[in-house]
Amino acid sequence: MGGEDHRHAQTLPADVPHPGAGSIARFTLTGFKAMPIHDQSPAHPLATALALSLGAAIALGLSRFSYGLLLPPMRADLGWSYLLAGAMNTFNALGYFLGALATPALMRRLGVWRLLIIGCVLASVFMLMSGLVSDTAALFLQRVCAGVASAFIFIAGGVLAARLGSMHSQRAGFYIGLYYGGTGFGIALSALLVPAALATAQEHGAAHAWQWPWLALGCACLLATAVIALPARAIGEAPRSKDAGRRFAWRDFAPSLAGYFMFGVGYIGYMTFVIALLKQQGMGPARITVFYTLLGLAVVASSRIWARMLDRYKGGESLAILNGVLGTVTILPALTSFAPVVFLSGLVFGAVFLSVVASTTALVRHNLPQQSWTAGITAYTTLFALGQIVGPIVVGWIADGPAGLERGLIASAIALFIGAALAARQKALVPGA
């Protein structure tokens, strides 16, 4: 596969560096050991993709989605309303938005690999710090900072995943999906770590038992960072290209950008409040742990499930299909507390929602030259972040009303259906695609 795939690989100019290690050692950076520039695949691309996927595990699985498990004990201890509890993820999304805006300039200055590792270290530190404070304002600040770091990780890792996919065009959808599916590793680990750390803290009579899980999650982030560093570096920076090619233009991608914004609004409501809803419906801690673990494992499996579709469709078809499926399963826990249906909702949700993210990276890869990927991925990430700012506030506000959390999830599902309709209008830009 290697020889054929290298002939299809595109190149990247100086302003979109991709760090790594390889056979051609032309060094251009200072500080961290600089990345050689090359167009040769890592020796073990699957292992490299798996290691890189831990970046998504840190950025989303551990840093963001673990909060869904921590929301009930934090809300009970700190006396929060659902609106205030949802605002925690809104502030995290605000940080993510700010980080996304800053990422292109930082990437040009620091390089992709260095920005990835800096983001991983910072996210780990902010997770640890969340376990050392109990003041609401301080916690909000920590969530903003963690969101900024997560954006650095997610965008830099996405660019590296797309580059790895360009070296192996026949498996590009799989490698891109595997990167985003790595979020599932973080979700599954959170499902195991949070209840265990919470129970241990309660046994020791901790004043704020929810702080111990934050500390455990921060340590897990540091360990994942150590695993990521060298394999991610092996992807390498692409050779410089003088061919500007097609530039990213917002108007060309307007339907899918709007659809992705609605995805951000809709999916985050489920991930923020579904555990609180299950507790409210009477589901026990053991079943909730199984539910969240299965959801996380389904995220990992999604990289294989949807890979062919991501390679096949060049327009907004994948984004539309996945948004539609997601809307359908999001509404299920709002309609019934029957355990098999609830577990089906979690499994399908996990198998779909990060593939929505992968579909936008695939869309960028199909329709733009490699030197425009950073601009494209950043644009989608920015709209995604804006949607996530709106989503938890709206769902939390609705949940505080008489209709409760069920009505909030219905609102999330409606947003996802609107996103599907918008994305379906996105056409491929490349002739013949």
Image: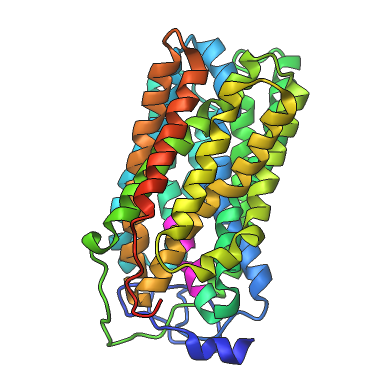
Up-down relation of residue 126 to residue 407 (above or below):
below
Q: How is the image coloured?
A: rainbow
Magenta span: helix, strand or loop, mainly? helix
Percent position of residue 295, x then y:
66, 40
| Foreground pick, 35 / 235 | 235
Residue at (69% x, 30% y) in the render: 341
Residue at (61% x, 79% y) in the render: 42
Residue 95 visible to the viewer: no
Image quarter for residue 347?
top right
Image quarter for residue 292?
top right
The residues colored magenta run: 153-164
| Foreground pick, 317 / 163 | 317
Name the side, left or right, on which 242 lies relative to 206: left
Residue at (41% x, 28% y) in the render: 392
Q: Quadrant of the N terminus?
A: bottom right
Residue at (61% x, 12% y) in the render: 207
Image quarter for residue 14?
bottom left
Percent position of residue 31, x then y:
41, 67
Percent position of residue 338, x then y:
71, 22
